[in-house]
Image: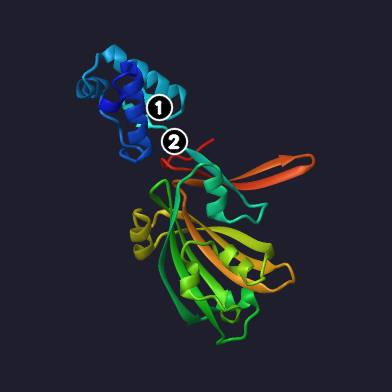
Amino acid sequence: MNDRARLPKYLAVHDDIRARIQAGEWAPEEALPAQRELAASYGVTIMTLRRAVQLLENEGLIETRHGAGMFPASRRYHYDLMHLSGFAEDLIAQGARVDTEVLGSERVVAPTDVARALHLRSGEQVLGVRRLRRIDARPSVLQLSYLRWDVGVSAQDLHGASLYEVLARRGLAVGSAEESITVSVLEQEQAAVLERPISSPVMVSRRCSITEDGHRVLYDRALIPADIAELRLDRGPDRLVVAYHLDDTGRVGL
């Protein structure tokens, strides 16, 4: 904080705590140090610290829970199922930090459900891609995608771009999709990747993406832990909005 010596003390403290929160120093549901401890660490009075805390609360960066302390404020995102934008792109536009890790990719015989969805013959091969999505550094979505092999996508094409972007570069713009959502529980290996207990409930999204000229090119199966997501329908006389709502603290509710 030496470079901020000219700032009022409470603003210098505010700026430093804000930077630490945004850097992810405290995990979701991890309490910040007590106010007296923070005041001592910054060498300020408790009243100065409280002014900084009040400003952080006003900005929506922290929340104080009676009897429990201060916590990073929960951030909620929604993913509109009525549009064809990619999952990561939708959340990034809302200010989320979305990191995608490619866990593996290989050429495989299309599983029965994949072959059926992509209108493939028995025994035809696809490129299987396994990815982990982290939202604000927390493992949040485990996704297994299958692309028709004749599309010509390689493992090298997958880094740093969404699958929809990769397809568009090949003149295969996605124009529609069929999607179903069911519920299940995590198996041991899935639970380990998502850092959740075995048998934790998950929403399972299965989506078949179809190009503008009617070719079925991509099938996705995504596991989304139920502790961070819910499915909402917003009904009106002339509208219907279906969307995932994701909460990075693990608390789902209205």
Mark found first going from the N terminus, 2 or 1:
1
Q: At 35% from the left edge and 40% from the top edge, which residue is drawn?
A: 23
Q: Residue beneath label 2, please?
A: 74
Mark 2, Cα crowd under 10 Å, few <14 / some 14-19 / many 20+, is some
Pointers 2 and 1 in contact (C-beta within 8 Å) = yes
220 lies above or below 55: below
**Is 203 or 131 nearer to us in this picture?**
131
Q: How many marks?
A: 2
**Seen from this angle, which residue lies furthest right?**
238
- Element type at mark 1: strand
Q: Quadrant of the N terminus?
A: top left
Q: Residue beneath label 1, please?
A: 63
Which quadrant of the structure image shows residue 214? Answer: bottom right
- Residue 74 in the figure: left or right of residue 189: right
Q: At 37% from the left edge and 25% from the top edge, which residue is drawn?
A: 65
- Residue 100 in the figure: left or right of residue 180: left
Q: At 42% from the left edge and 30% from the top edge, which residue is drawn?
A: 61
Which quadrant of the structure image shows residue 171? Answer: bottom right
In percent of width and height, residue 191 lies at 36, 59
In percent of width and height, residue 115 lies at 59, 78
In percent of width and height, residue 39 lies at 24, 20
